[in-house]
Image: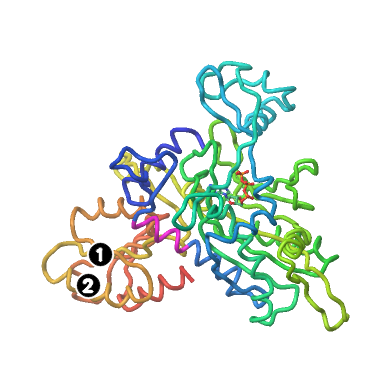
Amino acid sequence: MAADRLENIVALSKRRGFVYPSSEIYGGLRASWDYGPLGVELKNNVKRQWWRTMVQGREDVVGIDSSVILAREVWEASGHVETFTDPLTECQECHKRFRADHLEENFEAKNKRKPASLDEVNCPNCGNKGKFTVPRQFSGLLKTYLGAVEDESGLAYLRPETAQGIFINFENVQMTSRKKPPFGIGQIGKSFRNEITPGNFIFRTREFEQMEMEFFCVPGTDEEWHQYWIDLRLDWYKNLGINPDRLRLFEHPKEKLSHYSKRTVDIEYKFDFAGTEWGELEGIASRTDFDLSRHQTFSKKKMQYFDTEINQHYVPYVIETSIGLDRMFLLLLANAYEEQTIQKEDGTTDARVVLHLPAKLAPIKLAILPLTKKDGLPELAKQVMDDCKKSFHCFFEEKDAIGKRYRRQDAIGTPFCLTIDHQTKEDGTATIRYRDSMLQERIALDKVKALVLSNID
Ligand code: ATP
């Protein structure tokens, strides 16, 4: 995203109550963000949408909510203690730190070839070439200590992914929900990584939320299931109105696959960040039986499924879909944000900022606006509010000129505004205004709820 566009989105987010810089009254905590009243609504709507599609709407997936802090052995078995590291390098001129792999990837994207070494790479901060230190491995795990004494015995990690909480509960869930492969377990929750270079607003932070699903299948059927989930997940974005020209699949080259992966495909969006055009939204990985087998070895507990039809034990293969909620949030804003110039009938122009959010995800679905504060209009408007607020999120406002109120709703993505005027008292109709087209028409008050519901369901 061009720097000024990203800045405008950050500014709008703060001004309207989507996202605030965290700990701001103390000068802020770098790359930490708090979600405001509209932000939490949008976030919850995205979670609900994902949960409906991936868990409740399917007969072969169930959900869990596991702990953030798990036994230390979990991360030893998963390989995170040993391999969850990034190569850290520092520019000796400006002393800014970078991930060496990111510097190399950006160089390659620009020059269509890999750099021979970091000596060829310019510092993205100060521009000097070849000033980088030899990269050293830096652990991405955030540590904490449990108990009264801060020593090795109480060392624990904040989870860097929700997936392991699913794997260690494989047998619990399989038995209690009486599922048989192929079946999946979904989870939404916070994850933590000690990122070296957090940034680009909420794209890369140290504390973030993930929506993950681990799908357990019969070995040998994994390649087919992997493709199935890639196609399905890509459609999810398209169905939410994300511009398909800005979406792409990125196949991880074989030599760069993670230690657990047989094949990984990322869904990326063209954010156009400075230095990197494309950013990962979601990883869809074929993890074989790596995780369950490792937990079986480390815990000495069976992680197998006994298939009575073939009379055989096997460790299921796993397909993972893993999306970052905060990145999805940024994607929605980036995809929806528009600064529009409007031609008016008298030949002059006007400007507005509009968020074309999908109605089902918009924080507020309907703004109910009495034209004036008197003549019983607010009371009528409150009646509509009382009726609708049980079914979806509404907003009531009686201050300021109606045009100004429309603009405020446009800027936060409210798909419908309903203006109660004097005619409402006479014939029970009001003006409904559509955010994207700005068209207005009269509608009977008793039809409003059904109209909004039909657009958000
Ligand atoms: P990246 O290469 O961008 O660091 P990753 O490949 O390490 O990401 P995964 O481990 O595949 O990411 O995590 C799955 C998803 O979790 C990512 O696609 C992303 O949406 C989200 N995610 C990972 N790290 C972060 C982070 N630091 N901040 C926000 N979201 C993140």
Residue 204 position in % (x across, y down): 52, 43
Pointers 1 and 2 in contact (CB under 8 A)? yes
Name the residue nearer the viewer: 185 or 443. 185
Q: Nearer the viewer, residue 232 or 417?
A: 232
| 90 is higher (above) or lower (below) than 379 | above
Residue tagged 1: 396
How far is mark 1 from mark 2, CA to CA? 8 Å
Query: What secondary structure do most residues of the magenta stretch adopt?
Result: helix
Kindly identify which numbered label has been placed on residue 382: 2
| Residue at disc 2, CB closer than 8 Å to ligand 1 | no
Report the span colored magenta.
37-45
Q: Amino acid at mark 1?
A: Phe
Mark 2 lies on a secondary structure that is helix
Q: Amino acid at mark 2?
A: Lys
Residue at the (88%, 81%) spot, across then down: 311
Magenta highlight on residue 38: yes
